[in-house]
Image (cartoon, rainbow, N blue to C red):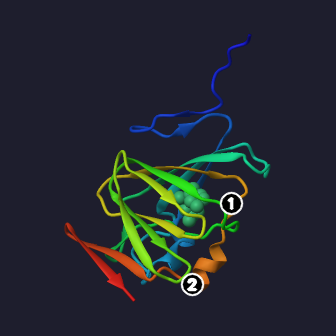
Amino acid sequence: MKIFEPKAKHDFMNGILQGDAVEKSVKLYKDAKHFYKNVDADLRDDTVMYEVYLYSKGDDKVGNLNWGLTVLKPVSVLGECNMTRGHFHKDLNCAEFYFGFAGKGLLLLMDEDGTCYSEKVFPGSVHHIDGRVAHRLINIGDEDMKVGACWPVQSGHDYERIEKFPFKARIYKDANDIKVEEE
Ligand code: F6R
Ligand code: ZN
């Protein structure tokens, strides 16, 4: 029997997901401006807002899984906490698990009726996201927020739907106070 090295390594609490099979993408402020209520003219376009590491089998074979890591930077946009773009899955049968590794934040969730609610995210937190629920991560702390994810390859991301039907809650930080603004 041959014994192989793993195809990826993930230093859960202190590091990142690495390996030949891992793809990394970076979201810069210039591509994230429309997530926030206001545009911060003082924030450079090339500011890194978040990084996503993905270990995928790379095909859409039903039953295959993706493993991912999101690193959300502690940036604020005129007081509004940094967040991921957020999405519904294209295949609404596909649920997802998120799990907190580092930092502090919220998992903002919105069901198909537009009802928003959230769960606290911290090292060790585990979150099941139903396939019909839109999801977005928000960093409310002062350090990188690292969140792992596992979801089916056939989920897809429906970003258009969330842009037409946006989350109805925004999170702001003033010194250490967190404020929720709801529509
Ligand atoms: C996958 C998933 C995460 C996000 C990542 C970035 O279904 O939920 O891996 O893709 O946190 O967020 P978005 O994709 O909303 O920019
Ligand atoms: Zn998702």
Contact between labelled residues 2 and 1, with CB atoms less than 8 Å apart: no
* Front-lying residue, 57 or 152: 152
Residue drawn at x 75%, y 47% as measured from the top left: 58
The quadrant the C terminus occupies is bottom left
Marker disc for residue 165? 2
Q: In the rendered image, which quarter is residue 83 located in?
A: bottom left
Residue at image coords 59%, 81% = 163
Say what secondary structure mark 1 lies in: loop
Quarter of the picture containing the N terminus is: top right
Residue drawn at x 57%, y 36% as measured from the top left: 18
Compared to residue 173, the image places residue 147 above or below, namely above
| Image height of 5 relative to 14, above or below | above
Residue 12 higher or lower than 68, as above or below = above
Local SS, label 2: loop
Q: Residues within 10 Å of mark 2 (few under 14, many from 20)?
A: few
Q: Please name the amino acid that badge 1 sits on.
A: Ser
Q: Position of residue 102 (x, y in %)?
A: 37, 47
Q: Position of residue 15 (x, y in %)?
A: 44, 38
Q: Amino acid at mark 2?
A: Phe
Pick whichever, 132 or 18, lies toward us.
132
Q: Is mark 1 within 8 Å of ligand 1?
A: yes
- The quadrant of the picture showing ligand 1 is bottom right
Tag of residue 155: 1
Left or right: residue 11 versus residue 130 is left
Q: Position of residue 38 (x, y in %)?
A: 42, 84
Q: Say if disc 2 is inside 8 Å of ligand 1.
A: no
Where does the image place residue 35, in percent across and percent down from the top left?
50, 76
- State whether residue 149 appears in this view: yes
Nearest the eye: 136 or 145: 136
Query: Is 34 left or right of 65, judged from the image as shown?
Result: left
For the question of whether residue 85 can be seen, the reply is: no
